[in-house]
Amino acid sequence: MEHQTLAYSNPADFRTQSVTARKRAGTIDLSYSGKDIDFNEMMKHRTPVDPSEVLKEMQGQGHTFANIGVGTILTLTFQGKDYLAGTIQEREELGDFVFNPIGGYVHSRDLNRLDFAGLTEVAEEFLPITGKNEIMRFSRRGAVIGRPYSGKYPGFETLINLKTPARYQAPNLENCVTVRGASLRDSPQILFETPRNAAKLVFNYHMETAFTNFGDLGVSFHGAEEKFNSKAEDPSKALETFLNPYGIALIQLQRGQLTENVFQMISGELSPGNPQEIALSEVFLADENAIAERNTMPLPEFLRSQ
């Protein structure tokens, strides 16, 4: 695929806050530090931590994670079968190549609207594009979830509504999450990534596509990805958003569980992939305490472990 830039931004504009997690009577309660930090400061704290210490501290006064991220388990039904959609992502920070739920870091301005942060990531990273080069937009509760890249692609008239729940749930995630005792909209789950001392909320949505004929529209599922360019002469263009050349992968579901059947949606048809080339990210690898000690696991190994 030819390299296609979608947008530029200045990474210096990013701010977030560390988050402390406490485990009380089956609930994970989160609180923010109240102090904004930039991307470089956040990365300084994204270092390995001992899983047993994390659990002990969460059961006591709380453990402080470098940041909170969001991810989205996104499922759809195509020709009567259910699929889990995710981006195929090359993670330079970790030196790996994984199937990952769509998501990202949370800016401090969105810490009190975490569902919005998760939905925005879907709109910005999952791009269903028709054969006429029109982009299909997502909606939730009747409202359009942004119109990113409108200068590149005209919008398609039909919206894809996202509803809860998804038809797949990643194993062992904590289900009850609050922020300072308040429940969160759309009821996300949570996991804790000890190799990077980070917490991640995981939302669950299913795409309503009953009245959308991907075949007739020639729809291809594309993904968007960001990459930092330390040599950019213009700081406002140091962070490039571009079409991910690996696109979006679909893993077929059977009775709500993953299978070895992997596809991509290309011009309205499913193109088979090789399950041996798919490795799952940490979102799928949490233990009984919602702690993920591994960054990745090959899909065939994961299926054998279930």
Image (spheres, helix red, strand yellow):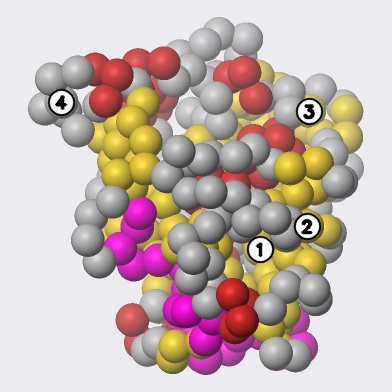
Q: Which mark is residue 232?
A: 4
Find out whether residue 201 is within the magenta segment.
no
Residue name at image x 75 percent, y 49 percent = 139
Q: Which quarter shows the N terminus?
A: bottom left
Q: If you read the primary sequence from the N terminus, does the residue marked by circle 3 or circle 1 appear first?
A: 1
Pick the residue in front: 235 or 19. Answer: 235
Residue name at image x 22 percent, y 61 percent = 2
Q: Amino acid at mark 1?
A: Leu
Q: Residue furthest front?
A: 132
Q: Amino acid at mark 3?
A: Val
Find residue 58 and report its horizontal and vertical position in percent: 67, 36
Mark 3 or 2: the one toward you = 2
Q: If you read the primary sequence from the N terminus, does the residue marked by circle 2 or circle 1 appear first?
A: 1
Labels 4 and 2 touching (C-beta < 8 A): no
Measured in 3D between alpha carbons, the distance from the residue under mark 1 to the one under mark 4, in whole angstroms, is 34 Å
Magenta span dominant secondary structure: strand
Q: Is residue 245 visible?
A: yes
Pick the residue in front: 248 or 25. Answer: 248
Measured in 3D between alpha carbons, the distance from the residue under mark 3 to the one under mark 2, in whole angstroms, is 27 Å
Residue named by callout 3: 179
Q: Residues within 10 Å of mark 2 (few under 14, many from 20)?
A: some
Q: Quadrant of residue 75?
A: bottom right
Q: Amino acid at mark 2?
A: Asn
Residue named by callout 2: 161
Q: Quadrant of residue 56?
A: top right
Labels 3 and 1 touching (C-beta < 8 A): no
Pick the residue in front: 81 or 90. Answer: 81
